[in-house]
Image (tube, rainbow, N blue to C red):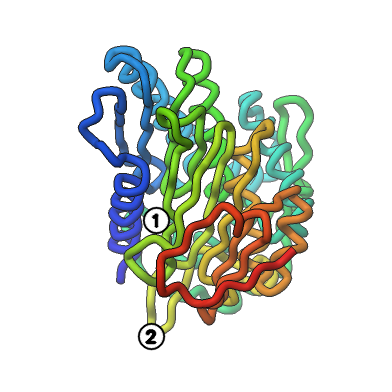
Amino acid sequence: MSLREALRHAATVLLALLCAAVLTACTNAELHKQEAYVFGTRVDVTVYGETRETAEAAMAEVLREFDRLHRAYHAWQPSELTRLNDAIARGEVATVSNELAAMLTDAGRLADLGDNLFNPAMGALIEMWGFQADEFVPRRPDPSALRAVLDAAPRMSDLVINANQVESRNPAVKLDLGGYAKGYALDRAAAILRAKGIENALINIGGNILALGKKGDSPWRIGLQHPREPQPLATLPLYDGEAIGTSGDYQRYFELDGKRYSHLLDPRSGGPAEATQSMTVLVTPREGAGTLSDAASKPPFIAGDNWRQYTRRYGIDHALRVAANGHIEVTRELRARLQFPSGTAPVTVVD
């Protein structure tokens, strides 16, 4: 399966799940929805309990913001981020927007918490594996080039950020915010909707989801994608201010010689992490919940059997992992919220 086909399949499944689990009455006059394709995935915004005119104006502003963020922080098409990467490669100080400076500072903090298993400075590795391309061609990187990047050990802590001036102590730093920007966009969308007086909405960016309010008398209900089947692994209610993020080896990947190569790279080895099929984290209401739901799913995914120590570091008690062998592990707090379909394999509950 090509990367494009995999993305299309994942987007289709996610859309079907969301429509089945959330939009139980798609013709309901109080339910309004807009969709787009941004950040390399399908996004949709659903508003409940507003007039069509109010909902559509608010959703359109959210989608315009998504487009702005996509263009501003694209990792390989000309953008503010690529200009910063060019300056870093030349050993120069770059002047960036206040927004990007704040994003980089926050991403550095999250990277430190996760022992750099979440590492937006490793864009060179992502490029080597072919995941920075509009027209994807499956390939394995040259071992010597990969080793050179690993030896250079680019980290977010290499950046020196002074107000909106950014430089790097390490010229091997090449920034890619693909594991951060979707979550950041969730928070921006929530801020826009709240400013517009929207109290009940659901924002979905390729499976990274944030809830505002509820849907009528009930909470929003979502489905977690099964990493190997075209069906939900489980469903759960999502309450006001909560965000959920999933990292999965089924989201962006290619296959060569019968082996799956995921875009979720382990900065320690330089290759795709192989111990986990999917890792889901649910972030309870707090500032930056959307951003955290995106970034904090990466370290536990990569850590494999040691996943729980990383969710604890991020202050996350609701988490679920599907191991490489298909075994499901879930925290006690999240298990209490989940509904599994009949026939689901045994689930291990962890503290």
**Element under disc 1:** loop
Residue at image point 45% right, 35% down: 218
Which residue position holds label 1?
A: 133
Residue at image point 36% right, 70% down: 229
Q: How many marks?
A: 2
| Quadrant of the image containing the C terminus | bottom right
- The spot of residue 319 in percent (x, y) is 63, 57
* Above or below, comparing residue 68 to residue 208 in the picture: above
Q: Please indicate, yes or no, whether residue 196 appears anywhere in the rendered image.
A: yes
Residue at image point 63% right, 28% down: 96
Residue 27, label in figure: none
Amino acid carrying label 2: it is Gly
- The spot of residue 336 in percent (x, y) is 60, 55
Which residue position holds label 2?
A: 258
Point out the residue furthest to the bottom here. Answer: 257
Q: Along the line of sight, which residue is nearer the eye, 328 or 88?
A: 328
Q: Is residue 39 left or right of residue 304?
A: left
